[in-house]
Amino acid sequence: MSRTLIKDLRDNIGNEVTISGWVSVRRNQGKMVFFDFRDATGTIQGVVLPASSAMEEAKTLRTEYVVSVTGEVVKRGEKNVQQGKENGDLELRIEGIVTLNTSETPPFDVTSDTSVVGEETRLEYRYLDLRSERMQKNIRMRSEFVRRVREFLFRKSFTEIETPLLTESTPEGSRDFVVPSRLHPGSFYALPQAPQQYKQLLMVGGFEKYFQIARAMRDEDLRADRGFEHSQVDIEMSFVEENDVMDLVEEMMIEVSEAMGFTVKDTPFPRFTYAKAMAKFGADKFDLRTEEERARGILAYAWVYRFPFFEKTDEGTWTFTHNPFSKAIDEHAPLLLKGEKIGEILTGQYDLVCNGYETGGGSIREHKPEYLKSVYKIMGYTEYEIEERVGHMLKAFTYGAPPHGGIALGIERILMTLTGEKYLREVQAFPMTRGGQTAVMKAPKPLTKEQLLELGISVTKAGKKA
């Protein structure tokens, strides 16, 4: 289909062009019919004059019809310029219209701010919501951010590697989403909460600099800035210390943010130990901006580091605060190995904070099996349980595992800071509802009897045991 993009019409003044897109606005003034048309690149007003051969077709058009329109691009007279409107000084004088598809009346106006529309309606008709100017901007900004991150990391000699989506269920962190195995009845895969173990194994495999735009699935309570699914810039590096990872990420975020037109408040990023952050802000995530800087959309990045390795559970046992694969700081490594002064052990963990959100977290990893084993012993695991949970990691670390560390940056949370949105769903194309239902499609829902039989699964009503 031959077409001219609306963004290129200014280069075609005086020429006849054909554009394709949607009808945003239709105004029938009897002898003349005016339209606002849009495509993915912009909007333009078109007019069908009384003598135009397109008049009959023009009278049939309604908002959200998909059309191909042919006409001459003309410069408006000075008195007719629409100030403040995109292409307000241009007009398309229409001579031909082809209706490519009709449309029912949408349940809400996609040319307005759809954030005021009810969540259920917006997500049921998400494909219409995505036509709105705000959602188009947010999703395209997400794409630009990911592209610039990729370009930066490729320049730094990183290799992009995909890791499996079907993996082993582990008891750490959030609840897993599990997938039944047809070939192994009664056994289950888990969807990854993060590519943590695989990216460490890639360091054992000698790749040294890895990244991927990774999908992560966690069955945790839903919040404004947390969903069942999210994407992260996943990075791992060999032969590095804490500052190496932090310096690389800082350079990347400054370059990417400024290239996208944003202003970073402080460079280099301020750094706070966890103890100092808690004493100063009462939290390990905080907003360093003034009210005026908030209004201007300034980005205030900061690092928080040197977290406690362990914390007490409600049952009085020990668990990790961030990641069991983290490495204790050098001066506390003997305490870890002996299981002494557990509450005082600090780890090489670091979080990237921006505008009140935790936007990334990582650590220097443990690469020696005896220390990783000590972590699990402190948490109360038996020798058998340790072997069942992380035996493969312990084995891998006996084959010359290099010192390594990395970070995962949450793409949605970063986009929330860039766009100023308050909800994660505003920067995802097809997010979940607050109740955990998928957008547009109807999931979760029961499987058929045939599917359950094939998988060897029986289902009982909630609250009842089989």
Image (cartoon, rainbow, N blue to C red):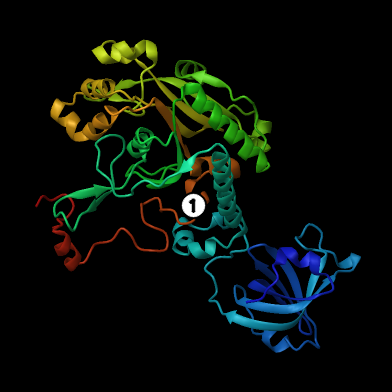
Residue positioned 38% across, 14% down in the render: 330
Residue positioned 68% across, 73% down in the render: 3
96 up-or-down from 399: above or below: below
**Residue 12 is drawn in which quadrant?**
bottom right
Q: Which quadrant is home to the N terminus?
A: bottom right
Q: Secondary structure at mark 1?
A: loop
| 346 left or right, relative to 240 | left
How packed is label 1: few (under 14 Cα within 10 Å), some, or many (20 or more)? many
Q: Is residue 28 visible?
A: no
Image spot of residue 417 (x, y percent): 57, 39
Q: Is residue 409 visible?
A: yes
182 up-or-down from 400: above or below: below
**332 or 63, which lies in front?**
332
Image spot of residue 193 (x, y percent): 34, 42
**338 or 160, which lies in front?**
160
92 up-or-down from 89: above or below: below
The number of callouts visible is 1
| 180 left or right, relative to 216 | left
| 388 left or right, relative to 35 | left
**Residue 108 is drawn in which quadrant?**
bottom right
Q: Amino acid at mark 1?
A: Gln
Q: Furthest-left residue in view?
A: 466
Image spot of residue 46 (x, y percent): 75, 74
**Residue 86 is drawn in which quadrant?**
bottom right
**233 or 452, which lies in front?**
233
Q: Which residue is mark 1?
A: 428
Residue positioned 67% across, 35% down in the render: 263
Image spot of residue 9 (x, y percent): 76, 67
